[in-house]
Image (cartoon, helix red, strand yellow):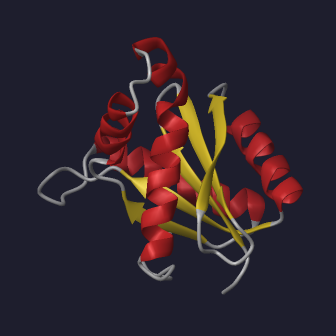
Amino acid sequence: MIGRALGVDYGDGTIGLAVSDPLGLTAQGAGSLDRVGDRKDLERLAALCAEREVLRVVVGLPLNMDGSEGPRAEKTRAFARKIHERLGLPVFLWDERLSTAEAERVLIQADVSRRRRKEVIDTLAAQIILQGWLDAGSPEVDPA
């Protein structure tokens, strides 16, 4: 399916965001949202999807290193279901193990200050999640 995809890095305090180009080849950071509650967060995601003409959503699933799911993954699955219900778009889960660590490594290598890293890490993690999904051929597996 060609069209924009939204990448979501769902965290306790923020939601990192990335959007693909219309051909679904590259992911670009789209900022982050400070979490204020699911209802308001979903409203803001719906507005972003409408504005950017997003056709599908990819949510990073925080698996344990052995591939099992813990409480954080359960919360993420529940939020992914809410995204699907609220937006009516296909939602896919993507293994996000090490995405934040990779984002941190990239920012350190780029000599980004600790303060600035904190501001952009969620966005970069969402970009890494979305780009990984795009690079894998946008698999339509493991829907939320």
- Where residue 106 appears, as percent x and y from the top left, is 36, 39
- Residue name at image x 85 percent, y 48 percent: 47
Q: Is residue 2 left or right of residue 129?
A: right
Q: Quadrant of the N terminus?
A: bottom right
Q: Is residue 143 visible?
A: no
Q: Nearer the viewer, residue 113 or 47?
A: 113
Give left or right: position of 138 versus 106: right
Q: Quick check: 122 left or right of 104?
A: right
x then y, percent, for residue 14: 55, 30
Q: Up-down: is 99 above or below 84? A: above
Q: Nearer the viewer, residue 9 or 136?
A: 136
Q: Residue furthest top?
A: 115
Q: Would residue 63 be seen by someone viewing this image from the given angle?
A: yes
**Direction from residue 43 to residue 114 in the image, left or right:** left
- Can you give x and y, in whole percent of width and height, for residue 140 in the image? 50, 82
Q: Residue at x 51, y 79 (%)?
A: 138
Could you say which quadrant of the image residue 136 lies in? bottom left
- Residue at the limit of the structure toward the bottom, as seen here: 1
Q: Position of residue 111 (x, y in %)?
A: 39, 25
